[in-house]
Image (cartoon, coloured by chain):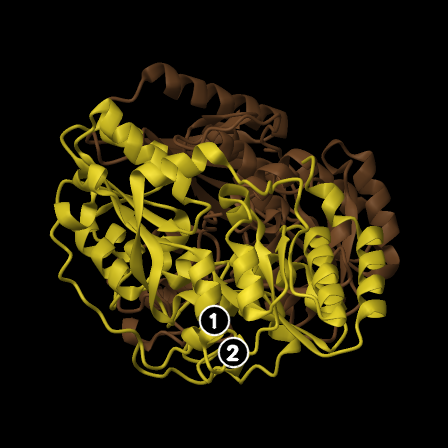
Chain colours: A yellow, B brown
Amino acid sequence: MKYLDEFSNPELASKLVDQIHAATSGEWAMMEVCGGQTHSIIRHGIDQLLPDSIELIHGPGCPVCVTPLEMIDKALAIAEQPGVIFCSFGDMLRVPGSGKDLFRIKSAGADVRVVYSPLDALNLARDNPDKQVVFFGIGFETTAPANAMTVYQAQRLGVPNFSLLVSHVLVPPAIAAIMESPTCRVQAFLAAGHVCSVMGTSEYPPLAAKYEVPIVVTGFEPLDILEGIRRTVLQLESGRYELENAYPRAVRDEGNPAAMAMLRDVFEITDRAWRGIGMIPGSGWKLSSRYAEFDAEERFSVTDIHTAESSVCRSGEVLQGLIKPHECEAFGNECTPRNPLGATMVSSEGACAAYYTYRRLDLPTPTVREPAGTRG
Amino acid sequence: MAEPDTAPIDLDGWVCPAPLRDSPTIVMGHGGGGALSAELVEHLFLPGFGPAAADVQLGDSAIVDVGGTRLAFSTDSYVVRPMFFPGGSIGDLAVHGTVNDLAMAGATPLVLSTAFILEEGTDLADIGRVAEAMGAAASAAGVRLVTGDTKVVDSGHGDKVFVNTAGIGLVPDGVDLRPDAAQVGDAVIVSGDIGVHGVAVMSSREGLEFETSIESDTAPLHGLVAAMLETGARLRVLRDPTRGGVAASLNEIAKASGVGVELTERELPIPQPVRDACGLLGLDPLYVANEGKLVAFVAAEDAELVLEAMRRHEYGKGASLVGTCVEAHPGMVVARTGLGGTRVVDLPLGEQLPRIC
C-alpha cells in the first residue's frame, strides 16, 4: 500500500539506525505513547536495533488497555439485557470484566457483534427498529470523531434505538499525569501520530515547556518510528525540549478542523478513570448535554456499577512505564494472552501481549507453572 | 497419542493456562484451528471417545492398513459464510479441503462422501450452484462422489447450508509423511502466496465488504504432492495451512517434531492486496487461512530439487523457501523480521481479532 511499504524499507532503516547510534552518547528513556507504536516496535524488533543506552518505555496509549474494569462490567450488563444488540470493535471482546468477557456473554446467547465502524452499528439500529443497538465507544482522539459522527447522524436521522457507551480518553492529560508522577522516569515522548492528525499539535508545546521534555509527533511504520527516535535523541543530546512533527505526511499543525468541530459539538470534557492508573481530571470525553439522550449508561441504568481492579495485575505500573511487562510476577504465569489478568495482556496493542507474543524468546520468562487452580 | 487417555472429562482439570475453563459453553475460538481447537480435541473429545480412539493419529488424515494396502481417510465440515465468495464457493472448498487433507498424507484421493445440512427457506438455486461446483471440482480433481446424505433443519437453526465431506485415498508404497517427522536442518517451503483465501472471504463478508482484486486460492493439491514425491526427495511433513494459517501449521509441526522453526519474514510470499487488507484490518497474513497452499518440510539438501518440481506445477509456481528447522527453541516458531530483529510467531489462540486503530 502506498505510504506503508516505503516506510518499512530495510536499507533506509539501517541508515537511520546508524544515525541514531552515532548521535547517542547519554542514557535516555523515552516513552512511545501509542499502543500501535508499541506493537510496531516489538513486531519489527526495532528496540533490538537501538543503542543499549536508549530505553523505550511503553505508554498508556492502548484504548483497550486503559478502559476501566468498571466500564467493561457496564458493557456486560448492557449486552446481557434482552433485546439488545451490543456492537464493539473486536479487541474488546476478550477483555475480562469481573469474571466474564463479551465472548462468553455471546456464547451464552447475547447478541454481541464485531463491527469495523460505528456507522455500521447505526445501520444495524435502523435495520432493527425493535432492538436497542449499543456501540461501545472507546479509544483516544483517533476513534472519537467517527463515534461523534455516528451520534450526530443518529440524532439527525432520528434513530432513537441507538446509543453509545462512552469511554473516551485524551492523550495530553495522560502525558501531564505521567510527568507529575513522583516516580516518573520519562525524559521524552514520541507523541501518537494519529491522535495529532485529528487534534493537531497545539496542545503539546505547553507540555514540552512545562515539563522540559522533548515531544516528537511520530508515525507507526518502522521508518516513522526510527525517525521519531532519531529526532528525540538529537533534542535530548543537545538539551532542547521542543515539539517537533516527524509525521508531516499525516499531521498538520492545525489538525483536522472538521473532525474537531464535530467533537466539540458531540462531546464535552469529563474526568475519566484509566485502568491501572486511576482517575485523571479532565482526561476524557462524555456526550454533551445536546446528545445526552444517546448515552447508554443512562438509558440502561448502569451508572451505579462500580468495580475494583485486580490486585495482582501490575498493568498500571506497565502503563506508566515503571516496569517492563516481564518484570511483573504474573507475566507468563497466571497471566497470559489466553488467561489475561489485565487488559495489557489482552489487546494486541497491549505492551504485555506484545512482549508475550513476540518477545518470549529473549526474555527470562519464568517457567510455566502447573495450574494455579483459580482464575484471577 | 502415546497412550489412550481414558480419564473422565474433567473441565476443571484442563491444563493451565486453560482459557474460559469456567465457561460451560462452546465459543467461536474452539473452531478457529488454534490452541482452543486443539484443547477441545485433547481434553474433551479424546477422553470422551475413550478406548475407541486409542492410538488415534492427530494429522489431517488417518492411515488405515487394509490387508496390506494403506488407505488415507479424512473428514471435514464446511460452514463458510458467505457460501459464494470471490474465486469459489462452499462447494469448491468441500471437495478441495478433503482432497488436500488426503494429499498431505501423500495419498491419491479416490472417493468422497458428502452430507448436506440445509436450512429451511434456503434458495434451491443456491444449493444447485453449490452442487454443480462440487461436481466440477471433483471431476477436475479426478475423484468420485460416491455416497451422500441430506438433512434439513428449521429456519433459524442453521446458516443456509453446511457441507461435510469425507474421503478415502491410496497411500503409495514407501510414502510416509507425518507431522512429527521434521528434523533439525530441514528446509521449510510454502507452495505460493499466503493469506489469499482468508482475505477473499473477508472481503465479501457481511458488514466488512471491501474492494480487492483477490480471489480465493481454493485448489486440489494432490497433483502437486505427487510431483514432489516423484522427485525422490526426502519429504518429511506436508500440511495445508487452512484455518489458523501458516503460523498454526508451523507451530503444530514444530511441537509434534520437537524442533524449532526459524522463518525469514521477507521471504514469505505475501501478495500486495493481502498485505494491504491485513494492514488495514490489523491482521497478520501468517494467521490468515489458505485453501490451495501447502507447507513442506524437506531435507535441506533436497530443497532445490523439490522447489524446481513445485514451480513446474500449476499450483506450485510461487513456491518459496521461507525458513529452516533449528535446534534452538524447540516447539517454537520464530521469525527474523525485515529489519533484522526477531519475533515469536505463536500458535493463534482462537480467531484473530481486528484491531481498533
* Amino acid type shown at disc 2: Cys
Residue at position x 58%, y 49% in the image: A193
Residue at position x 50%, y 53% in the image: A203
- Res A132 visible: yes
- Quick one: label 1, few (<14), some, or many (20+) residues within 10 Å? many
Disc 1 to disc 2, how far (Cα)?
A: 6 Å
User: How far across and down, in percent of the image, does residue B234 sit?
Assistant: 80, 58
* Amino acid type shown at disc 1: Ile
- Front-most of residues A81 and B184: A81
Residue at position x 53%, y 85% in the image: A367
Nearer-N-terminus badge (1/2): 1
User: How far across and down, in percent of the image, does residue A19 sit?
Assistant: 84, 62
Residue tagged by mark 1? A178
User: Is B240 displayed left or right of A27 in the figure?
Assistant: left
User: Is A216 displayed left or right of A50 in the figure?
Assistant: left
Residue tagged by mark 2? A184
Q: Quadrant of the N terminus of chain A?
A: top right
Q: Quadrant of the C terminus of chain A?
A: bottom left
- Front-most of residues A44 and A181: A181
**Element class at badge 1:** helix
**Element class at badge 2:** loop
Using the image, name the chain to which the residue with label 1 belongs.
Answer: A
State which quadrant residue A127 falls in: top left
CB under 8 Å between discs 1 and 2: yes
User: How far across and down, in percent of the image, does residue A161 sit?
Assistant: 17, 33
